Amino acid sequence: MPIEKITPNLEKQLEIAARGDVLLYNKLGGIGDILCARLIFEDMKKMPNIGNVTFAVPRKYLSLIEDHPFIDRKMAVEDINDEVIAGYVFSKDLTQTPGQAEYRTMPNAVRNRSDILAESIGLSLKSHQGHLTFSDREMEFAGQYIKRLGD
């Protein structure tokens, strides 16, 4: 089974990005893919000298990233154009990245999507922290829901 490897070119791209602002975006969303992407930002922000990190997702999914402490700027992907992209040292469309990697390794696709996303930009995840937060109301709802599942 072939495993996708990081190319030196990708490592170099991220090294260059560490000297400026970074834009990552997902054009289509998918709640799962956006939640998986949340795991890459802490490790990215720990890189020495990295600039601001922007993550853009479809407007209807902005609430999925609004609380993330390691994403400096959250924006709607609908607001991205060539001029916006030109303002970043490094930009990457993550939309199809996990699916393409999984397709290449089928039927043995076993890698975590957050690792696939990180590796696509030359980053190796260490923390795997998504930094999800929940309100008391959300926790109460989840507790009641889980309890009903057990009945």
Image (spheres, helix red, strand yellow):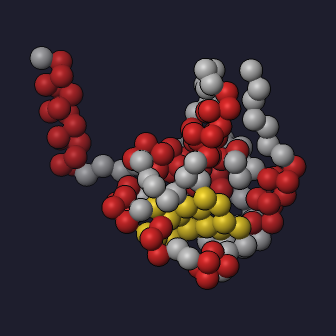
Placement of the C terminus among the 4 image quadrants: top left
Please determine whether, in this image, residue 27 is positioned above or below residue 54: above
Q: Which of the two residues, 103 or 10, is positioned nearer the viewer here?
A: 103
Residue at the image point whose x is 22% and y is 37% from the top? 142
Q: Nearer the viewer, residue 88 or 28?
A: 28
- Relative to the observer, which residue lies in front, 65 or 92? 92
Res 87 quadrant in image: bottom right
- Find residue 49 and report its image quarter: bottom right
Name above or below for residue 68 compared with residue 39.
below
- The reply to whether residue 35 is in sight is no
Residue 144 place in picture, x, y as percent = 15, 33
Which image quarter holds the N terminus?
top right
The image shows residue 2 at horizontal and vertical percentages of 77, 26
Across and down, in percent, residue 33 comes to 48, 45
Residue furthest out toward the top: 151
Seen in the image, is 50 located left or right of residue 16? left
Pick the residue in front: 150 or 26: 26
Q: Residue at x 21, y 28 (%)?
A: 146
